[in-house]
Every structure is written in C-alpha cells, then in structure tokens.
Amino acid sequence: MILQKEDIRRHTIAILVDNEAGVLARVIGLFSGRGYNIESLTVAEVDTREQLSRITIVTSGTLMVIEQIKAQLRRLVPIHKVSDLTVEGPSVARELALVKVSGTGDKRVESLRIADIFRARAVDSTNESFVFEIVGATEKLDAFIKLMEPLGLVDVSRTGVVAIARGPNPI
Amino acid sequence: MGDETMSGAEIVLKALVDQGVEVIFGYPGGAVLPLYDELFKQNRLRHILVRHEQAAVHAAEGYARSTGKVGVVLVTSGPGATNAVTGLLDALCDSVPLVCLTGQVPTHLIGNDAFQEADTTGITRPCTKHNYLVKDGSQLARVLHEAFYVARTGRPGPVVVDLPKDVLVGKAQYVGPAKVKHKTYKPQTKGDLKAIEEAVKLMVHAKRPLFYIGGGVVNSGVAACQLLTQLLHTTGFPCTQTLMGLGAFPGSDPLSLGMVGMHGTYESNMAMHDCDVMVCIGARFDDRVTGRINAFSPHSKKIHVDIDPSSINKNVAVDLAIVGDVAHVVEDMLKVWKAKQLRPDEKVLKAWWAQIDKWRAKDCLRFGSSDKVIKPQYAIQRLYELTKDRDTYITTEVGQHQMWAAQFYKFERPMRWMTSGGLGTMGYGLPAAMGAQIAHPKSLVIDIAGEASIQMNIQEMSTIAQYRLPVKIFILNNQYMGMVRQWQELLHGGRYAESYSAALPDFAKLAEAYGAVGLKVEKVGELDDVINQMISIDRAVIVDCRVDQAENCFPMIPSGAAHNEMLLGPEDEAEKPVSEDGMVLV
Ligand SMILES: Cc1ncc(C[n+]2csc(CCOP(=O)(O)OP(=O)(O)O)c2C)c(N)n1
Ligand SMILES: [Mg+2]
C-alpha cells in the first residue's frame, strides 16, 4: 500500500537527550501543547558517563505533522539527536508486558498453553493466578492480551516500545 | 585554583558584565535581594526600575529590538515571575532575544509551597525558548553564559534562568564566557548551496515573482537587510513585508508593495495570490498572512528561507526549503545570480509590473477625508510626514491604531518599528518605547497607542518620570476598543458588547499627574501644530488625539477569506458576509 500525503501514519522516533531535570517535561509538553499524539513513550538513561537518556516515542499523524514533530523536537535545546526509525532504514522494535491472569481449572490450563505458544514466561504463580512476561512487537502483545481476556485477565503493565536501528551504526 | 570564588549574586553580575550587558530592567523582591545588594555596590550595570514586571519584559524587548542586543530582565520569585509571563511569550512569538533572571525560594524549600514559590520553569517552559533552574552554584556561570548564547543564536528568543536564593548567597567559582561551549544547540547558518542555486534558477525563470519578507530578516541584522535590498534591486522583483518585516526593505522603495496579510495592501495580497514564484525570507506563513489556507497562493512555487527548520512546511507546504541565516543565504543568492550574469526576461517582468500597477491604482489605503473630525489614518499620515526626517523609533499598542501605523508609517530602515505581532499584547507599546528610549536617549521615540491599550501599562509613566525619558505617547482616542468594535460590526450584527471605553481618564491631566506634558487635539486644523509641539518638547508627552470613533481599518481579509476576497472599504462589508468557517477563526 502506498501512503498518500494526507494519510495518518505511525512512526517510531528515537531521541537522545541530556539527562537533565525537566527534559521529559519539555518533550511531553511539546506533544500536548501542539496537539500531537503519543501512542507510547519510554525513557531511560543509556549513557551514564555522558548522562544521556534515550526517549522512544511512537506517534501518528500525516506526513506534514510527522515532519513538524521532528523539527519541533530538534528545536529543543537539550536534544542531541532525533531519529525517525520508521523511515531511516530497517529497525527492531520491542515491547515487554507483564500480564496477570486469575482463575482455576480449564481456563488456567488454557492460559498456560497459549503462553507457551507466544513464548511468554510465567514469572509469578499462585494456585489461582499467573503473571506472564511477554516480549515482542506491539501487535504480538496486543494479540496475547486479547486471548487472555476470556481466561481471567485482571491486570496488564506494558513498557511501551523501545526500538533501535538494524545494522552496525548508532543513532 | 586560579579562578576566584565569589557569591552567586556576584557571579551573576560578573557574567552579565562579561556578556556586554549595560542595562537591566527589573523589580525587586525578597528572593532577589542578594542581587540587588550587589547592584547597589557597583556602577557598571544600570538598573531601570519599572512599575510592573510585565513592563520590564516589554521594555527589554524594546531595548533588544532597537539595538540588536540581548535584553535583560530581573524579577523576584512567585508573583514577580508570573507577572513576567506575558512578556516572555510575547518575546517568544516575535523572536526577541532576552535573558530573564527570576528569583526562587531556596533549594531546600522548592516543592514545599513556600512563600512566593512558583514552579517558574514549569510555568515558563512553553513561553520561553529555553529555561534553567540553577540548583548548584558551580553551574551558575556556565548556565548564564549558555542562556545568552541560546537567546541570541539561531532564531532568537527569551531564556529564563531561575535562581534559588541560597545559590545567590552561596559561594562558587566563576568561569568566563570563552570557556563555555554549548553541547547541543548549534543551528545551521549557511544554506545549502545546491538549494540556493535551484532557488535562483526558479527566480530567474519566474513570470510573476514576489518576495515575501518578514521579521527574520530584521533579526538577521542590518547587513542582511542591506544584502536583501541589493538582491531586490538586482532582480527588480516586487517585495511585500509582514507586520514584523516592516523596515527590512525601505517602505518607500518603488519595489515595495507594502504590508501583506489581513490588513495589508490590495496589491500585496493580490500579488501573493497570483504570483508564480514566491520567495519567502524570514517569515512564517502565519494565519494573519495567509488568509484561508486552502486558497493561499494556489499557482506559485514557494521558496522558503528560514533559520528555524520547524517554520518550514508548518502551515504551508513549500517546494524548496533553505535552512540558514538570511544574511548568509541572501549573500549566496546574490553571488550565484551575479556569477551567472542572470537577467530575468524583461518583457515578462514588465507585464507583471503592469498588473501590479493596476492593483496599486485601486489606492486601497484611501480613506474618506474630513475637515470636521480627525481621521485616524490622517493623524498617522501627518505624524509620519512631520517625523520621518528625524531619528525616530515607533512602537505601538494593539488594535486599529497599530494597523494604521503599519499601513501609513513608512519605515526605511530596520529596528525602527516595534510592535507586538505574534501575541498581539495590549500594553506592549509604552514599556517598549521606554526600553527603546533608554537605548537611544537622544532619539525621538513615539508610542502610537489606543486609549484602551495604553491603560494596560499606564503605570510606566512613573518609570518614565523617574528616568526623565522623553517618550512621546500619541493616543488615537476613538473611545472604543476599535478593533473589537470592528469585528463586532462585521461578525456580530453591530452589537457592541463591552467594547466602549467608558469612564476614560483625562489623558492630558493624567500626563501632568506623572510629571509629563499633556496635549489634546480635536480639530483637523490643529493637528500639525500639536504634533510639532509634541516633538519640540524634550520631556515625556501624552497627546490625546480625538479621532473619528466610527472609522474601521481597511483593506481587510475577513477571517476565512482568501487573498483575492479582500474588503476594500465599508461598501464591501455588506456584500461579502463572513463565512461560517470564518466565524470560528480568531
Ligand atoms: C492583553 C490583551 N487583551 C485583549 C486583547 C484583545 N484586543 C485586541 S485589540 C483590542 C482593543 C484595543 O483598543 P484600543 O487600544 O483603544 O485600540 P483601537 O483598536 O481602538 O485602536 C482588544 C481588546 C488583546 N489584544 N490583548
Ligand atoms: Mg480605541
């Protein structure tokens, strides 16, 4: 499918920032203040010596909006690098979820069977519950969680997407 | 250790001096007393005590815009900082370089709802280009030098440095500006040469070219304005200016079509609509300029030169973007043009000019003259004629008078015109005039005001008195919030809800109360005399110029209309009602 100019597309953007007070507020404030979408956002320090944090944002908008988002991000003073992983070559994106399922009997067995298919691990279990850890693309997590719903899904915690470009080069 | 240790307050003042600061506009309070104590002990920095923190920021804007230097503001924590917010956003919208120092409660009290605590960095984050909270004295000098660098580099803007009181009192080491290099903020100033060559190619082959220039040219500096003037004279292309770009190219030059946009000239807007190559330099396709966006200049290839990449393709998709400083890019354009010995097709260009002359012949700024009542346009015309040969700086408030000033006062040079464009802040003009007068003590500085706007920072008459500033305040008194009344007439059936300026003070007496001179004029025949009198008095003067209350500002592109759907005068109002889409626009 070829996207038209006006089509809404989803992009994953990686941002390298100085790990200083208020930097996340700057990024989030930019998105909320200008009415951009945040589908997911993750942040953590990735370089303790240089005190750099990496923010991964999944956002959506028209081509013009996506370009505008990147230009606005680059304008923030403590930003080192903004990289659009969706267009700058192939990349790997992963998300982790912890999924709690409560129940006994057949449903409990079924949840374990499905977890196996999805290569989810049980990281906690009681007689009447499991906590599964699942890693993968957002769609895989979505599918897993959906299947768990009728089997006693009670709680979900997701990290949001982290992503990195394939190949030898840094951001 | 080499470098000496000193108190945070001493570090701040030393950093300001090392940054070449001469004047600070400020207002004291508990959190900044250590700074005021240091100011007391020295005589290199001049402090101008305003009467409201908003005015301190506007004064610093007037100072910055009339000199090209960074304006400096000093206010206390809490209410001092919140009062400054309007000014900060004003400076952000109009790209004015400022450093605003705000006091803060001591670091150990931050977050405790302490007396006069405000989350200043939180509040000002979307109102500044950047801001800092300095929690550690060892970072103070670096942050201050960085703040000046960020404020003046790239697209200029306001920077806040929030200073907890313990950091001002505690001792730390000073570092000079030369030792501070910014890690991340390095805007691109040289434009891509390939793109510039392509732009020149588009330009030379254009049949209906048009330069559309804005405040970015002024910000780029006097040299940029001169280079652009050279480029225009080399090409012979017409040029229209935004409200912020007035003066970047001589207003009386035959190539100038005047202002573009909502209250711009007919010829400018028609040329914008019909051009085939638009060269936008240092302007941002603001909604006040474009009119209805889907009808904006439908047949043109658009070239956009800007130092801020986020201005490009924001409102209008352009065909060729050049990121860089105007001075560099225009210089390269000239070089390419000259090296290739280019010459546009004169016959084609002549036909375009013939079309433009037809639009010009409409004489869109004409107004019904009167000998009974002073027409506001006439008042500005006379003010222009009687002051144009002097060393004059003009500021304005916001409203009809602002637009008439923009239409009827011709600026030949940059940095002579200061108005609140992006934010449209009533109350801007008086403090801005103050700042300009501080920077240019011998010049004629005039605030063209409305009777409503002037009351938003009227307390600054006291500052003007204290420093004996000969600022002239020329009020076009129509007893209405005229611009509001005009919109109510156009959009709301003439129901003038709350737009009448009731209970106005006697402005002449008010002037006297503040130690200034008050003049009043109602008769057309006396206008010149009063203006001349105003000029000749070397003190502050308020002129209460009573003008036609019913006059509206034309031409006008009503909200939601396109450039070629302008209202030229009251006779058009009834014929072209505002669309439903237009009703929701500001
Ligand atoms: C701080 C602020 N509040 C409200 C407005 C909305 N506004 C725009 S023009 C205007 C009326 C200005 O009246 P006046 O100063 O008398 O100027 P005139 O239009 O009559 O020339 C108002 C209220 C504004 N621009 N700024
Ligand atoms: Mg008025």
Image (tube, grey):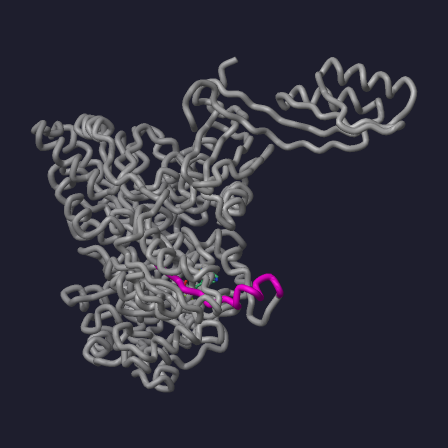
Residue at x 45%, y 22% (from the top left corner): A87
From the viewer's side, name the closer residue of B165 and A139: B165
In this view, the residue farthest toward the front is: B1
In this rendering, the count of numbered labels is: 0
In the shown orientation, is residue B45 left or right of residue B159? left
In the shown orientation, is residue B177 left or right of residue B227? right
Residue B6, quarter of picture: bottom left
Measured as percent of width and height from the top left, residue A74 is found at: 41, 39
Measured as percent of width and height from the top left, residue A123 is found at: 75, 27
Q: Is residue B237 above or below residue B207?
A: below
Residue at x 48%, y 53% (from the top left corner): B125
Q: Is residue B542 above or below residue B558?
A: below
Q: In this view, does B431 lie above or below A87?
A: below
Residue at x 40%, y 42% (from the top left corner): A75
Q: Is residue B358 above or below residue A156?
A: below
Residue at x 17%, y 52% (from the top left corner): B252
Residue B134, quarter of picture: bottom left
**Residue B580 seen in the figure:** no
**Residue B446 seen in the figure:** yes
Measured as percent of width and height from the top left, residue B348 is found at: 16, 28
Q: Is residue B571 magenta?
A: no
Measured as percent of width and height from the top left, residue B106 is found at: 52, 67
From the viewer's side, name the closer residue of B111 and A119: A119
Magenta region: B98-112
From the viewer's side, name the closer residue of B179 and A111: B179
Image quarter hosting the N terminus of chain B: bottom left
